[in-house]
Amino acid sequence: MTTASSTTAAPSGATAWFADQIANLGAFAMGSIAGVGDVCLFALRTVGWIFARRQRRDVLIPNFYQIGVMSLPVVALTGLFIGMVLAVQSFAQFKALGLETRLGSVINLSLVRELGPVLAATMLAGRVGSAMAAELGTMRVTEQIDALESMGANPIYYLVVPRFLGCLVLIPSLTVMADFMGVLGGYLYSHVLLGIDYHHYWENSREYVDAFDFLMGIFKSLFFGAAIALVSCHHGFHCDHGAEGVGRAATNAFVHSFVLILVLDLFLGIWLNNVHDFFRPEGPRRLL
């Protein structure tokens, strides 16, 4: 007598591939959520230590110098050429419409509201953010951070807070420098090379660019600076072992900071535009 034995059919190749993709997607989602939560806790600890203890001046001044003063040349040079590029790219379209004298309003409005803060933050992320991640990553690999903890010192207070305050306090100054050099570059190219009358150039700029536009860029830069410092220091603190881990931490610090800058710029721009429309219900300014 034969007994029928039930056999479990093996999953097909397509089914196994689909299951693997679902598993990978779930692992990526869980890892992303855990990473965001870890950064948020890191940020809360950093902000807590700002108010928990007075900051030492001999620690703050060197960080402020490295973050602010040493970043001025690259920010100024970038802003100068961006202003010129805006003049080059906008002149042909404005000339076709007979609005050459309105070129200053578009250049200066674009600079103070969007390009100035974003360019200053991008330069800060590339020059300072990567350096902070690499420096803290090296300290993690060589166990210097562990040595601080073993001596009873809090590494976030001694290593993260000065860098966070440096980025937060000095990025408005870098944004102002980027705005100034961009406006100067756009004017020099428009007046000297394109022959646009300087009186109409500045008059239209004064008419269409107001204090709210300037303060809007400064306000956004504060969020950019805080994001750069937190993301860069977090990557440095959680660096993998070895030289490869330090390099990966520096790269990820810049990439994630840059993406976060763009995301913050989008949502802050939408919110600030709504605020502007609330206080100025007559509607946006028009060039025609």
Image (spheres, rainbow, N blue to C red):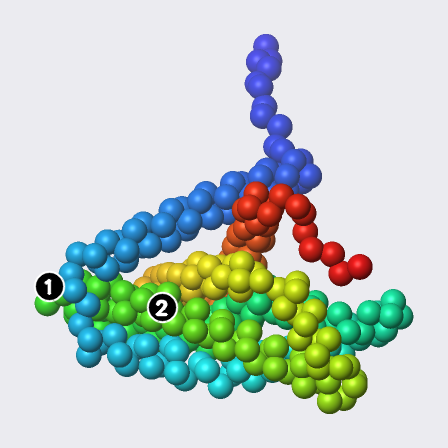
Q: Residue furthest top?
A: 1
User: Mark 1 highlights which residue?
Assistant: 152
Left or right of 58: which side holds 252?
Answer: right
**Residue 221 percent across, percent down from the top left:** 47, 63
Q: Is residue 194 above or below residue 213?
A: below
Crowd tier of the residue under label 2, counting other residues whose Cα lies within 10 Å: few below 14, some 14–19, many 20 or above: some
Q: Residue at x 24, y 63 (%)?
A: 156
Secondary structure of the residue carrying tag 2 is helix
Q: Nearer the viewer, residue 209 or 44?
A: 209
Quadrant of the image occupied by residue 160: bottom left
Res. 69 visible in picture: yes
Q: Is residue 238 left or right of residue 26?
A: left
Residue occupying the far bottom of the picture: 192
Q: Position of residue 195 (x, y in %)?
A: 79, 86
Residue located at (17% from left, 56% from top):
52
Which of the image's four quarters has the N terminus? top right
Q: Which residue is more in the foreground, 135 or 181?
A: 181
From the viewer's perspective, is 288 left or right of 267? Answer: right
Which residue corresponds to the image point at 47% horizontal and 48% vertical from the top-left? 32
Question: Are the residues flagged by discs 2 and 1 in contact, CB closer than 8 Å?
Answer: no
Q: Which residue is mark 2?
A: 169
Residue drawn at point x = 46 percent, y = 75 percent: 174
As shown in the figure, which amino acid type bears the numbered disc 1? Gly
User: Camera-side residue: 49 or 95?
Assistant: 95
Image height of 264 relative to 168, above or below = above
Residue 152 horizontal side relative to residue 215, left or right = left
> Where's residue 144, x and y in %?
22, 73
Q: Earlier in the sequence, mark 2 or mark 1?
A: 1
Separation (CA) of disc 2 from disc 1: 28 Å
Would residue 236 be visible to someone looking at this image? no
Q: Amino acid at mark 2?
A: Val
Kindly report which numbered mark, 2 or 1, lies closer to the viewer in this rendering.
Answer: 2
